[in-house]
Image: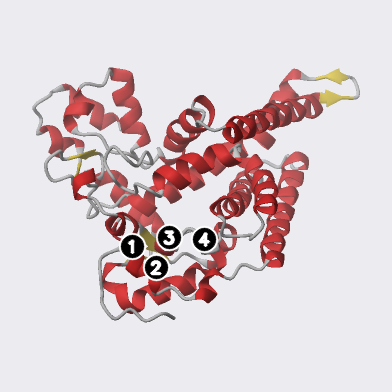
Amino acid sequence: MKKNTELKETLGSVREIISDSSFDNPTYLGIAYFIRDLFFFSVTMFLLWNVETWYYLPFLWVFAGLSIASLFIIGHDACHGALFKSERLAYWIGQIAMLPSLHAYNQWGYGHNRVHHGHTIKIKGDFVWHPVTPEQYKNFGIFRKTFHRLSWSALGGGIYYLVEIWLKGMVLFTAPMKEALRDKLLMLIFAFGSAGAVFYFGGNTPTGFDLGLGAWFFLKVWLLPFISWNYFIGVTVYVHHIRPEVPWKEADDWTPFYGQMRGTVNYHVPKILNFFMHNIFIHSPHHVHMKIPFYKLGQALEEIKVHYGAYVVERKSVWKDYIESTSKCKLMDPDTKRWMTYSEAFNDEDESEPELEAAT
């Protein structure tokens, strides 16, 4: 480990203390994880196709969401250049790994690698779970207010990600690079092709096509696993960066050190969850340096804590924190940049607001 004789609040000084071994990424290990995750995804899809017992299906939908998340994280690390030294290998494995989550490799990389990592919890910079002020909220129409209250509630993690990140950022927006358009077209072809195949073959019977059966297979095998995945990733991203005690900052008051160290929360989760989520909850080292592979994040965190332990935010209960944060973090005070509830923001000045709050 490199020695850091002077403790500085800069991202570069944190990176200096991470050992070279924390970046080791042998090709065989990345391929092995990819094959393992592809196997569990395939088994889960096979079971979903063949199982009709109603009390098994919710568990299979949960595991389908987790297996999609596993593959997505493989693609996530490949796109960061953390998993393979070969860019060509990273592209093809990352592209395949991201298809079940309906994410386009370079299209996703543009928003995530450049914007989210470059401007973490910066106002008018980071687009992930970006806050609005009470004044901005008051100018929303009734439908947008209702969506805000739903998507920022405990029920909204998957809804927010599905609409704000996937639909707006992955489908409707196209990054200004030819690779992004190419990858988005591949993703859309896969999305429509897989959905159509599930609908057609699921409804195909010896006596002809059954429309209701095709719709059921589309729901059971395609749509609900995708929704499950959106909830897993939505809640994960939320708890990484939203906490009542972590204010966002304006550009002139923001630093990369603050965004990546103070604006990124680490969680120690059960082994069964971590089996699928690939250390993604050990998040500060990943934001300090994107080229640390997921299986080295625990080692890198311990190295960072030797010198910068006071700046590392560590938590134990993802679900408890999620419930707490979704109850307290609704709007952002324009002066302090701290989180507020709707009641704190409006102080009952708008009689329509308490009625809408009661509904959510």
Q: Are marks 1 and 2 in contact (CB under 8 Å)?
A: yes
Residue type indicated by callout 1 = Leu
Q: Can you say whether 206 is above or below 262 in the image? A: above
Give the Cα separation between the discs numbered 4 and 3: 13 Å
How busy is the neighbourhood of tag 2: few (under 14 within 10 Å), some, or many (20 plus)? Answer: some
Among the two numbered marks 2 and 4 on one chain, the one whose residue lies closer to the N terminus: 2
Residue at 39% x, 68% y: name it: 15
Residue 306 appearing in the image: yes
Among the two numbered marks 4 and 3 on one chain, the one whose residue lies closer to the N terminus: 3
Disc number placed over residue 283 in the picture, else none? 3
Mark 3 or 1: in front is 1
Which quadrant is the N terminus positioned in? Answer: bottom left
Residue type indicated by callout 4 = Lys
Q: Are marks 2 and 4 in contact (CB under 8 Å)?
A: no
Residue ID for mark 2 = 15
Q: Can you say whether 26 is above or below 183 in the image? A: below
Considering the numbered disc 4 on the image, is that residue within a helix, a strand or a loop? loop
Considering the numbered disc 1 on the image, is that residue within a helix, a strand or a loop? helix
Residue ID for mark 4 = 291
How busy is the neighbourhood of tag 4: few (under 14 within 10 Å), some, or many (20 plus)? Answer: many
Considering the numbered disc 2 on the image, is that residue within a helix, a strand or a loop? helix
Residue ID for mark 1 = 11
Residue at 44% x, 45% y: name it: 114
